[in-house]
Amino acid sequence: MNPLYARATFVTAAHNLRQLPDDSLAEVAFAGRSNAGKSSALNTIAGHGKLARTSKTPGRTQQIICFGLGDGRYLTDLPGYGYAKVPKKQLDHWRQTLTRYLSSREPLRCLVLVMDVRHPLTDYDWLLIEAATRGNVALHCLLTKADKLSRSRAMAVLHATRKALEEAGVEASLQLFSALKKSGVDDAHELLDEFLAEIPPDARPAAPDDSSTPDR
Ligand code: GDP
């Protein structure tokens, strides 16, 4: 396991896009329907029992939670959606905020769309996919709770989901995952490594004037 992800620590809970960290160079966002298994997936990927809250704490579910990894790298936990209890006006507001975040957040490199393997690609998943596509953000589909299906059934869902995305002209990587069995964690780390592990030196903030430092 890349120890980078074990470093994830809570930085801020943003109610709106202006409150997001302004020193971010590279960010990967996790989104998913409420109850899809997003918090469990994040906790498993970070190797933390309780990084993301798995309980449905009202209020907290309506914020973008930012976890810092150091050097301007972040994981963000987007509010779960699809919960009928939220008033429609508030839901619409959050849909707009999320779609704006996905389509215009400059450091955002990848959206990890967490879906219960038994219910992939709901209408709202498509809304997020479209927003990420508009923002030129890579898409990774994490089909979780894979332990709930036989291996062959889970693979069939993976293939069907890939096909549906291809038919819609959406480029995406996909994987099976289980927080319960801790399977798919290496694949998830590889994906994050691709977007976060190495930040090119020219993307880092300029160092203070070091002209006095002798060449080595
Ligand atoms: P969130 O609302 O998307 O953050 O979902 P949670 O992570 O809170 O998970 C919702 C429910 O699904 C909880 O009861 C979890 O224990 C369960 N769950 C999450 N991941 C898995 C998994 O990989 N396998 C199984 N069997 N259950 C899971």
Image (tube, rainbow, N blue to C red):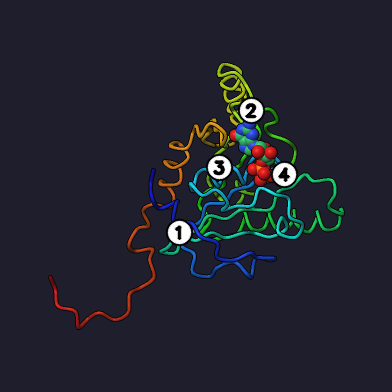
Ligand 1 within 8 Å, label 3 CB: no
User: Helix, strand or loop at disc 3?
Assistant: strand
| N-term-proximal mark, 4 vs 2 | 4
| N-term-proximal mark, 1 vs 4 | 4
Mark 2 to mark 1 CA distance (whole Å):
34 Å
Q: Residue at x 70, y 30 (%)?
A: 119
Mark 4 to mark 3 CA distance (whole Å):
19 Å
71 in relation to 54, above or below: below
| N-term-proximal mark, 2 vs 3 | 3
Which of discs 4 and 2 lies nearer the camera? The answer is 4
The residue at which mark 1 appears reads as 69
Which of discs 4 and 3 lies nearer the camera? The answer is 4
Which numbered tag is attached to residue 164?
Answer: 2
Number of numbered discs on residues: 4
The residue at which mark 3 appears reads as 139
Type of the residue with mark 3:
Leu
